Amino acid sequence: MRLARVTLNGTLGLAAKSDGKVTIAYGADLADLDHHIAAGTLADAGAKAAAGETVNEADLTFLPPLVRPSKIICLGLNYRDHALESGLGIPDFPVLFARFPSSLIGHGAPIILPKVSTQLDWEAEMVAVIGKGGKAISEADALSHVAGYSAFNDGSIRDYQLRTPQWTAGKNFDDTGAFGPWLVTPDELPAGAAGLKIECRVNGQVMQSSNTGELIFDVARTISLLSGFMTLEAGDVLVMGTPGGIGLARTPPLFMKAGDVCEVEIEQIGLLRNPIVAE
C-alpha cells in the first residue's frame, strides 16, 4: 500500500497508488494519516483511498505524509562513508538529533534558502514511521512496530548547524525538511527496507549514491536502542541518516542555490523532488 496526503484542485484527500494507478478519496479526516497510524486504522483508510476516483498523479499537490508527529528523531553519521567524510569517526551508538514539524514540506514544495546563509546542503535519507509504540522493544520484534517507509531530504544549513555541538539550529530552518511523497507499507518492501538503492541528485547530477543495506544502525537495531531509553509512540518519525557525498565535505564545499532542483530517490519507495527558492 502506498498512501499520500494530497490536494487536488484545492481539496484535501488521501491518494493511493498501486501498479501505477493513482486514486483519491476526499476528506480531511480521511487524509489524516497521523490519526490513522495512531488509531490503527491505516489499512481501512487505504482501502477507501484505493476505491476512490482515478486521477493523474501529475495533477496532485503533495503534502508531508505526517504533519504532527510527537517525535522526529534523526540519525547522524549512520553510513560509514558519511561518518568518515565528516571526520567524526564511526559511532558505537546512534548519533541523534531532533527535527520539528514546523520544518516539514512535501514533494514538489520549495526548499527555502534562507537570507542568513548560503550553506544549504542536501542529505538523502530514508524514513521509518512507527506504527505501534512501546518501550524496551526487542530487535527481533522491532520491525513489527513499523507502519511504513518514506523518503526525506534533510536540508541542512551548515554554518548554523556547526555553531554549536548540538545540530538543532541548522536542521530546523523552516521549509528545509522535504518528506514524501508516499508512505509505503512494509509489505511492499524487503524487511527493514534494507538493500534499496538511495540516491541524491542536484540538477540531474548524482551527488550521493548508496544502499540502505549500508546503514550502521539499521531500522530494527535503531528502534530497539531508542526504545531502551524512551517510549516510542505511533506516528513517531525516524530519519535514518545520509550516505557520503554531502556538499560540505567536498573540496571546495558545494551548496545548493536558488534555481537548483534536488531529488532524493529510494528504490521501491519513491522519488522526492524539490526546487530551491531564495527566501
Image (spheres, rainbow, N blue to C red):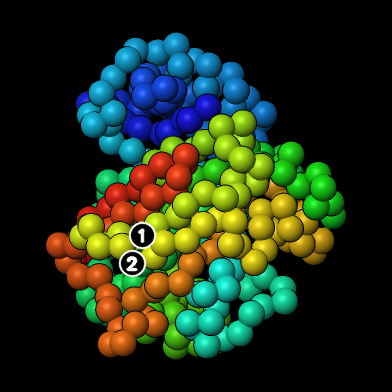
Extreme residue in the left direction: 259
Place residue 240 in its image quadrant.
bottom right
10 Å crowding of disc 2: few (<14), some (14-19), many (20+): many
Determine the secondary structure under disc 2: strand
Is 80 or 141 nearer to us in this picture?
80
Place residue 118 in its image quadrant.
bottom left
Task: State the residue at coordinates (44%, 22%).
Answer: 18
Q: How many marks?
A: 2
Is 175 or 275 nearer to us in this picture?
275
Task: State the residue at coordinates (25%, 70%).
Answer: 256
Amino acid type at mark 2: Met
Residue 268 versus residue 80 in the image, above or below: above
The C terminus sits in image quarter: bottom left
The disc at residue 200 is 1
Alpha carbons under labels 1 and 2: distance apart: 6 Å
Task: State the residue at coordinates (54%, 21%).
Answer: 45
Confirm whether residue 67 shows in the render: no
Residue 53 versus residue 268 in the image, above or below: above
Image side of residue 155 versus residue 80, left or right: left
Residue 253 in the image, given as x and y percentages of width and height: 30, 84
Residue 66 in the image, given as x and y percentages of width and height: 49, 43
Task: State yes or no: discs 1 and 2 in contact (Cβ < 8 Å).
Answer: yes
Is 28 or 76 nearer to us in this picture?
76
The disc at residue 207 is 2
Confirm whether residue 66 shows in the render: yes
First in residue order: circle 1 vs circle 2: 1
Amino acid type at mark 1: Cys
Residue 214 in the image, given as x and y percentages of width and height: 58, 62
Task: State the residue at coordinates (49%, 65%).
Answer: 242
Image side of residue 75 versus residue 3, left or right: right
Determine the secondary structure under disc 1: strand
